[in-house]
Amino acid sequence: MTADAGDRRSQRERMLAGDFYLADDPQLSQDNRRAMRLMEEFNRSPADAPAQRCRILAELLGACGEGTVIRPPLYCDYGWQLRVGVRTFINFGLVALDVATITIGDDVLEVSNDGNGGSNKYHCEGGW
């Protein structure tokens, strides 16, 4: 892929627009290293420290709703492109390739890494 000399957008702007971009761009690389550092901290966090996990997720993700539980491990590219609604439960092993916005709504049960080659999502009106 060659860069379009007339395109003055940053690689991040190109990525967000869904256009070709260079993933090893210094800004995107910095954003990815930030996410890796926070994911590592989250994935090592103790099960009996929900406040610590919520603090890390609030820093990592674009949004994480009240009453949401995400069980480690969690993997993503940038974090800020991933938004999770309220009262949502995400089981072990979510892989979110968030070069585009990913929104997981309210009252969702996400069964990641279900052994069937994908994940299953269940929505429950009115909460679990």
Image (spheres, grey):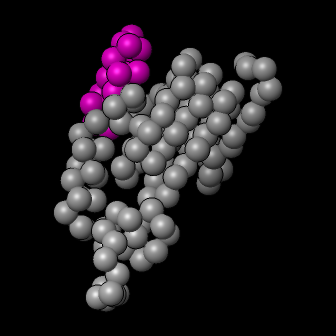
In this rendering, the answer to whether 54 lies above or below 118 is above
Q: Can you say which quadrant of the picture contains the N terminus?
A: bottom left
Foreground: 2 or 111? 2
Q: Position of residue 59 (x, y in %)?
A: 34, 31
Q: Nearer the viewer, residue 82 or 112?
A: 82
Q: Using residue 55 as the reference point, say whether residue 116 is left or right of it.
A: right
Residue at x 34%, y 63% (from the top left corner): 12
Residue 33 visible at all: yes
Q: Position of residue 114 (x, y in %)?
A: 62, 42
Rendered residue at 38%/13% (across/down)? 51
Residue 34 falls in which quadrant of the image?
top left
* Position of residue 92 measured from the top left corner of the image (x, y, whole percent): 50, 33
Query: Residue at coordinates 38% horizontally, 65% vertically from top-left?
Result: 13
Give above or below for 9 relative to 2: above
Residue 21 sits in which quadrant? bottom left
Residue 55 lies in the magenta-colored region? yes
Q: Bounds of the magenta span?
A: 39-56
Residue 77 vs 6, above or below: the answer is above
Task: Decide whether the magenta segment is chiefly helix, strand or loop.
Answer: helix
